[in-house]
Amino acid sequence: MKANNPELGAALESGDQRLLEKIVDEKLKAQMEAQRKEQERMAKLMNADPNDAEAQKAIEEEIRKGLVKSNYDTAQEQFPEFFGQICMLYVDVCVNKKPI
């Protein structure tokens, strides 16, 4: 937690419930505001003139971003080992009296 979000990690370590709630609340508000702005931008794009070259470029970019996100999500689901450090545990065992 400290590596990804030092502020939240410090609040967790301190055990201060109010500070933790404040940080989480701020993060949620910021996320909701960003989501609202994105929705407004998309609504504006969808209502733009379909013959406008700039609107077409913006829509094309949104489609491209959607495809990239979809591919990223699929990769995370199918190949999670590429997205994090994995510590393997090797255990010496014998199967049918043969060491493995």
Image (cartoon, rainbow, N blue to C red):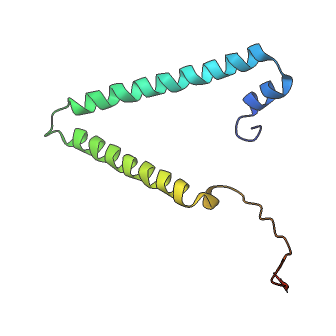
Q: Is residue 98 placed above or below 91 in the rendered structure?
A: below
Would you say 44 lies left or right of 70 here? left
Would you say 37 lies left or right of 91 here? left
Q: Residue 15, located in which quarter of the rendered image?
A: top right
The location of residue 78, given as percent across then percent down, is 53, 59
Q: Is residue 91 placed above or below 95 in the rendered structure?
A: above
Would you say 17 lies left or right of 56 here? right
Viewer-proximal residue among 4 and 49: 4
Q: Is residue 59 placed above or below 15 in the rendered structure?
A: below
Q: Residue furthest top?
A: 18
Q: Residue 20, located in which quarter of the rendered image?
A: top right
- Image quadrant in which the N terminus is located: top right
Q: Is residue 59 placed above or below 95 in the rendered structure?
A: above
**Which residue is found at the position 39% from the left and 30% from the top?**
38
The location of residue 56, given as percent across then percent down, is 22, 43
Viewer-proximal residue among 94 and 45: 94
The location of residue 95, given as percent across then percent down, is 80, 80
